[in-house]
Image (cartoon, rainbow, N blue to C red):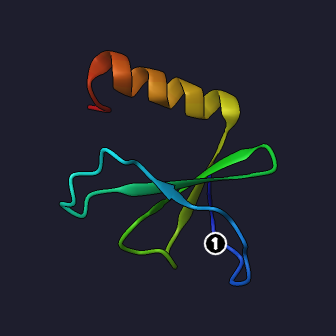
Amino acid sequence: MSIQPAKSSMLNWRKSSASAGAGECVEVASSGQAVLTRDSRDQSGVVLAFTAAQWLGLMSRIKNEGGLG
C-alpha cells in the first residue's frame, strides 16, 4: 500500500548503516503498527506502508534469496 506522508509528520526515518553511498537506499520509519519506507533521494515522494508481518516476510525473503527478483 502506498500513502502520502503528512507534511508535519514527526517520524524518525532511519537509513541502513550498510548503505554504500551510491544513492540507492530506502529509509524506514514506524508509525503505529505500520512500517513505512521511502526513497532516501525523494523524501517527499510516495511512502510504502507494510504491516509488521509483511515487513518481516520481505526482510526474510531478501536475506534468504539475496534479493527480490
User: Looking at this view, is 53 or 19 the one in front?
Assistant: 19
Q: Residue furthest right?
A: 32
Q: Amino acid at mark 1?
A: Gln
Identified at 36% across, 22% down, the residue is: 63
Above/below status of 23 relative to 44: above
Density class for disc 1 (Cα within 10 Å; few <14, some 14-19, many ≥20) is few
The mark tally for this picture is 1
Q: Residue at x 26, y 58 (%)?
A: 24
Q: Work out whether 26 lies above or below 45.
A: above
Question: Would residue 61 be found to the left or right of residue 13 on screen?
Answer: left
Q: Is residue 7 above or below residue 49?
A: below
The spot of residue 46 in percent (x, y) is 52, 68
Q: Residue at x 64, y 72 (%)?
A: 4
Helix, strand or loop at mark 1: loop
Q: Position of residue 26 (x, y in %)?
A: 41, 56
Considering every residue shown, the one lying at the far top of the view is: 64
Observer-nearest of 57 and 13: 13
Picture coordinates of residue 58 (x, y %)? 48, 30
| Quadrant of the frame with the C terminus | top left
- Residue depicted at 46% across the width and 21% down the height: 60
Q: Is residue 11 left or right of residue 24?
A: right
Where is residue 2 shown, x and y percent of the image?
60, 59
Please indicate whether residue 22 sits to the left or right of residue 3 in the image: left
Residue on which the image places disc 1 = 4
- Which residue is situated farthest in the bottom direction here? 7
Q: Residue furthest front?
A: 17
